[in-house]
Image (cartoon, rainbow, N blue to C red):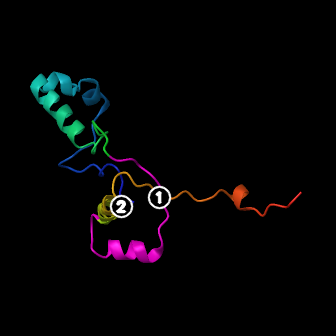
Amino acid sequence: MRPMFDEPTEDNPELTVEELATAKTGRTVFSEEFIDGMADERKKRRGRGPQKAPTKRLVTIRLSPEVVAFFRKKGPGWQRRIDDTLKNYLASRGTRSRPARRASRSSRAKRVPR
């Protein structure tokens, strides 16, 4: 692993205690506009951040390997393509139709006559 700091050289000597004692902070050296601009740049690079109006929900779903392979082989955006496929399926069934509910395990159990 590379060290965090380079070894002192003639062009870049180690600072002495006196030099450190008289060192100035960035706020005293740079203008407020520059510092504010740097803060804005840091905020931009922090990633996407929360959505203002989330349109999708984060869920975990288990898919068979062949389904994942089929969508992934077409490259980036494979999860969106799965979402589009599911939305198309729902649209083909109509907005009012709902899938039949499966019977619960307890209702599927054989009933013993009394």
Q: Which residues are magenta?
A: 56-77
Q: Is residue 108 left or right of residue 26?
A: right
- Residue matched to label 1: 99
Give neighbour class at mark 1: few <14, some 14-19, many 20+ (Cα, 10 Å).
Answer: few
Q: Is residue 60 magenta?
A: yes
Q: Main secondary structure of the magenta part?
A: loop
> Which kind of residue does numbered mark 1 sit on?
Pro
Q: Is residue 67 above or below residue 54?
A: below
Q: CA distance from mark 2 to mark 1?
A: 9 Å
- Measured along the vertical axis of the image, is residue 111 above or below residue 30? below
Q: Earlier in the sequence, mark 2 or mark 1?
A: 2
Q: Is residue 51 magenta?
A: no
What quarter of the picture does the C terminus occupy?
A: bottom right
Q: Secondary structure at mark 2?
A: helix
Q: Nearer the viewer, residue 91 or 19?
A: 91
Residue drawn at (28%, 27%) of the image = 18
Q: Can you say which quadrant of the picture contains the N terminus?
A: bottom left
* Residue at the limit of the structure toward the front, as seen here: 114
Residue bearing the label numbered 2: 93
> Which residue is rendered at x = 28% and y = 37% of the image?
53
Query: Measuring 41% from the left and 49% from the top, which residue is drawn there?
Result: 58
- Residue at point 28%, 29% (across, down): 20
Farthest residue toward the right? 114
Tell me if 93 is positioned left or right of 111 in this view: left
Horizontal and vertical percent for residue 57? 39, 47
Q: Residue 36 location in percent, x, y?
A: 16, 27
- Residue 86 in which image quadrant: bottom left
Which of these two is toward me, 100 or 113? 113
Mark 1 falls on what kind of element?
Answer: loop
